[in-house]
Amino acid sequence: MKLLFLLMLIVTVAQAQDFQDQLQKLLIEAKPGQVIEIPEGNYEINRQLNLMVNGVTIKGQGIDKSILSFKNQKQGAEGFSVTANNITFEDFTVQDMKGDGIKITRSKGVTIRRMRVEWTNGPDVNNGAYGLYPVMCKDVLIENSVVSGASDAGIYVGQSRNIIIRNNEVFHNVAGIEVENSIAADVYNNYVHDNTGGILVFDMPDLTIYGESSRVYKNKIHHNNLSNFAPPTNIVGDVPAGTGLMVTANRYVEAFENDFYQNKTSHIVLVSYMITGRDIDDEDYNPFPEGIYIYNNKYNEGGYDPEGGSSEMSQDLIEVLRESLPLPFPDIIYDGSINTDTLEDGRVPKHLRICIKDKATFINLDAFSNDSRPSTDLKPFDCELEKLPEISIP
């Protein structure tokens, strides 16, 4: 059953409030399997919209036709806050939220397609942190959507399992796409441009699960040179402007058949959590990047003007590297961190190695040894790993 509520072409303030009240009422009273349609038009929403009913689809008439503006939001942090299973958002725009765009928590079955989430004032530290924001979810599909202006990540999936992020465009965010502490993610065919960092695959301490098994492939990752506008104390504030793909402390990550172009610090950065200088109190947390397999990527014109993030640590690190490395910086930068607890006869086990099968410039910074000896030799990393399986969503 579809519920379609129509408003007059000329919407008065009272009528706009009536639209908002009707929409929230439909969300509260929805039945499983129901489709709530947002009609064509521009509508002002001044408070967070909540959904707690399983199996609901919220559908507009197209991202340029059905637009919900939260510019004058007075109540709540999100545009939409959802705690329900089997939820679909499609074919409309939400913009200028006080906080996050669409936050979906503890949901099994999330589909987001042909959506636009944006902050129309452009990059700004006061914008909401996340555009599309499933967290602690399972079976997540985000496709054919556009996100811009987020002060953390445009598309962020955290502490989740079984994820597909494909065919999206993300720009003018601090991070275009971020997969954090999640298991089994495919990120492919996305156009990732003009962010601070293009795609981040992170694993952080003190969260509900640890991240592993992500594939990042067939993405266009271009011109991610936007100065970092995240609050400097946020972890994403450490991301250097001009980073294409950054893997921090994650395990079993594949990056292949991506097109890297004009990322001014480096196309790929592989680092441990220790590089942040933050304390680690989580005894079960593994801060090292392990089992990373990079192959069949294209690299063009990167590393020509390295720039730090918004944090002092990131700025200091890039300054040190600028003083010690010639320009341009290499296509791939690895901090050289190794988990000595995993060594077998003094060697990293095969399944935990960093393997690179690309024609790329490279440096191992060897940042954590007592007598640091950076090396540009790729031969120790000339290896192959077992490929990860394709993600499918029921």
Image: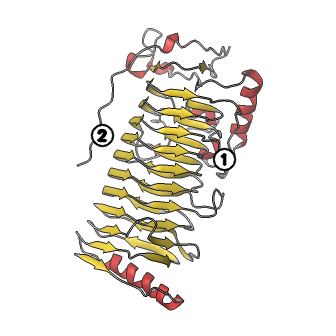
Q: Residue at x 42, y 54 (%)?
A: 135
Q: Which numbered disc covers residue 391?
A: 2
Q: How is the image coloured?
A: secondary structure
Residue 62 image offset from top left, x and y in percent: 40, 66
Up the image or down, 141 lies above or below 308; here it is below
Amino acid type, callout 1: Asn
Whether residue 295 is visible, yes or no, is yes
User: CA–CA distance between discs 2 and 1?
Assistant: 32 Å
Q: Secondary structure at mark 1?
A: loop
- Residue 122 lies, in percent from the top left, at 63, 59
Decide which of 63, 386 is in the foreground and name it. 63
Name the residue located 66 percent from the left edge and 49 percent from the top edge: 233
Q: Amino acid at mark 2?
A: Ile
Q: Position of residue 385 (x, y in %)?
A: 37, 20
Q: Is residue 281 visible?
A: no
* Quarter of the figure with residue 365: top right
Image quadrant holding the N terminus, namely bottom left
**Residue extending farthest right:** 323
Residue at image location 35% in from the left, 53% down from the top: 137
Residue at image coords 55%, 20%:
360
Residue linked to disc 1: 228
Picture coordinates of residue 6, whole percent (x, y): 37, 84
Using the image, tell me which numbered label, if any, was put on residue 46.
none
Q: Is residue 363 above or below residue 224?
A: above
* Helix, strand or loop under label 2: loop
